[in-house]
Image: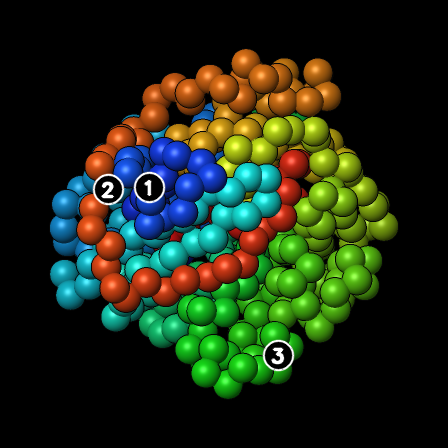
């Protein structure tokens, strides 16, 4: 069998169309940048930037935007072998507005449905999924069929594979395998919840979340997402409920209050955010996720993982873009050493960035807006990401 991947993510992909002007409503923006987007895809990019062998399972349309996404993934060092086309549907695009420090509305274009929700269980490479050292999936993958069944099929394959035997080569080789559930609650992607106006815990999502949690070893989400999964909003109560649902590590992101991590072994870490002048909070959560995977793979203790992930998220929050803003290890280490994101580091463009500038296109009239603001992204404790 080939060498297992360090990280395989599964779920959304799309093209982020970002204003190159901050503090300007979309109606008045004149120039945009084009970037790879979609939270699981960005997490794979973040992990690859930190030196991990990463791949993503997702689907695109069969169009020029799909060609761009394949090219971008390859440039970022993410394996695109499981990124397949769906001819019937266009590749999703997402617009945002940028009003620092804490207002970043997103406008998703995923009609009539998104190709990444057309992942089928029988098409999965379950051997690779089962062998990956970290498998990352999201709540959005549970919102519709056939993606829901495919996601649960992948999770069952992880459970059936059991623990991976560790060789004697290094402490990292002996690190435990992780199945990470990014709670990723976006009600606009759940038609039944949107139509009924149901509370989060009464929504159809809750049962699907509980089923997925039974197969996960790590759960990550903000307090709103934790409420969907567990019915609890108070961070410690939410963490305990996630542990009771089956995970070994519960990570509750608390915005300006930092991050809380509680492990089944009794370890608790409360990590404050890293100071940063926020430029664009979208993407900070994805950088956090990639760094979380990196720390889990390294076998670090919980507090160190959270500090590292906070720093990675803060760096991305200090930059305009998302995927191309993901930090390299030396940047995270510098931020941790200095206790803040250096201004020169924040201002510097990320190297190896496939994002490109574009003039403003005409606006479609079928935007699906969301006004959910992620809150200040210092330390990446917001849950948002610029994703389609």
Can residue 162 be seen in the rendering of this structure?
Answer: no
Residue 292 is marked as: none
Residue 230: % across, % down: 69, 70
Can residue 346 be seen in the rendering of this structure?
Answer: yes
Q: Residue at x 55, y 48 (%)?
A: 103
Residue 122: % across, % down: 30, 66
Instruction: Identify the residue under disc 3.
Output: 199
Q: Is residue 173 left or right of residue 260?
A: left
Q: Which SS class for mark 2?
A: loop
Q: Nearer the viewer, residue 2 or 216?
A: 216
Q: Residue at x 78, y 50 (%)?
A: 262
Q: Kindly indicate the quadrant of the structure image that contains residue 116.
A: bottom left
Instruction: Identify the residue under disc 2.
Output: 360
Residue at the extreme bottom = 196
Q: Nearer the viewer, residue 198 or 296?
A: 198
Spatial CA span between label 1 and label 2: 7 Å
């Amino acid at each position: 069998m080939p060498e297992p991947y360090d990280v395989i993510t599964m779920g959304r992909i799309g093209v982020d169309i970002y204003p190159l002007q901050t503090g300007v409503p979309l109606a008045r923006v004149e120039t945009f940048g084009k970037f790879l987007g979609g939270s699981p895809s960005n997490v794979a990019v973040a992990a690859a930037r930190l030196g991990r062998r990463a791949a993503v399972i997702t689907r695109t349309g069969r169009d020029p935007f799909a060609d761009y996404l394949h090219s971008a993934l390859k440039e970022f060092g993410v394996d695109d072998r499981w990124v397949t086309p769906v001819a019937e549907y266009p590749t999703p695009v997402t617009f945002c507005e940028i009003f620092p420090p804490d207002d970043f509305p997103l406008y998703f274009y995923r009609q009539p449905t998104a190709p990444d929700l057309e992942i089928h269980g029988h098409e999965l490479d379950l051997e690779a999924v089962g062998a990956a050292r970290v498998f990352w999936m999201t709540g959005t993958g549970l919102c519709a069929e056939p993606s829901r069944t495919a996601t649960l099929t992948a999770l069952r394959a992880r459970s059936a594979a059991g623990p991976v035997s560790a060789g004697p080569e290094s402490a990292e080789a002996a690190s435990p395998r992780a199945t990470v559930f990014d709670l990723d609650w976006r009600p606009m992607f759940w038609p039944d919840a949107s139509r009924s106006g149901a509370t989060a815990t009464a929504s159809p999502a809750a049962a699907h979340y509980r089923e997925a949690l039974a197969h996960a070893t790590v759960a990550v989400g903000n307090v709103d997402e934790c409420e969907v999964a567990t019915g609890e909003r108070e961070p410690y109560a939410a963490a305990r409920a996630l542990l009771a649902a089956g995970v070994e590590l519960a990570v509750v992101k608390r915005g300006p209050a930092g991050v809380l991590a509680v492990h089944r072994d009794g370890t608790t870490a409360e990590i404050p955010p890293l100071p940063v002048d926020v430029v664009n909070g979208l993407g900070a959560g994805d950088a956090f996720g990639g760094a979380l995977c990196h720390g889990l793979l390294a076998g670090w203790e919980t507090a160190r993982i959270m500090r590292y992930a906070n720093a990675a998220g803060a760096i991305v929050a200090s930059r305009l873009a998302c995927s191309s803003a993901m930090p390299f290890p030396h940047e995270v280490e510098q931020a941790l050493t200095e206790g803040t994101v250096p201004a020169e580091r924040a201002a510097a463009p990320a190297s190896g960035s496939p994002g490109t500038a574009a003039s403003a296109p005409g606006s479609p009239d079928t935007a699906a807006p969301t006004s959910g603001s992620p809150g200040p992204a210092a330390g990446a404790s917001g849950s948002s990401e610029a994703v389609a």
